[in-house]
Image: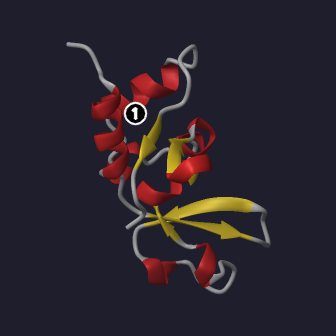
Amino acid sequence: MSTTSSDICAAADRLQGFVGFNRKSGQHIVRFSEDSFGMDVADDSITPANEFVWQPVEGGLMALRRELLQILLDQHVDDRLVITTPLLVYMRRDDLPEIIAQRQRC
């Protein structure tokens, strides 16, 4: 069965957890509740993982960024983040352009 861009977008929208930027270490970290970050992560940098991977581009469109998905993959908690096969296929297929879609942030 082939993986479509709709499958990939749906998988990205099902991502779990919260991503925050730790200014002290200069790294993004993932937690599974907003209140578990502590003092080193500013509240305004905490983003749900399913929103973190999308970035606005021109014309109100959003791009599903591979480099942001890679940050999540580097955490090695795929099951907790709900990183599924469509996202892994997307990451392997770097010969294809990034998905750009019309969507709205939650």
Q: Residue flagged by tag 1: what amino acid is it?
A: Leu
**Residue 57 visible somewhere in the drawing:** no
Q: Position of residue 65 (x, y in %)?
A: 57, 41
Name the residue rendered at 70%, 70% in the picture.
22
What residue did someone put label 1 on? 87
Alpha-carbon neighbours of circle 1 within 10 Å: few (<14), some, or many (≥20)? many
Q: Is residue 27 above or below residue 94?
A: below
Q: Is residue 47 above or below residue 85?
A: below
Name the residue rendered at 32%, 36% in the picture.
84
Q: Residue furthest front?
A: 59
Q: Is residue 34 above or below residue 92?
A: below
Q: Position of residue 13 (x, y in %)?
A: 33, 51
Q: Which is more toward the observer, 84 or 4?
A: 4
Q: Which is more toward the observer, 59 or 85?
A: 59
Q: Position of residue 82 (x, y in %)?
A: 32, 47
Q: Position of residue 14 (x, y in %)?
A: 30, 51
Quick one: SS at disc 1?
helix
Q: Quadrant of residue 48?
A: bottom left
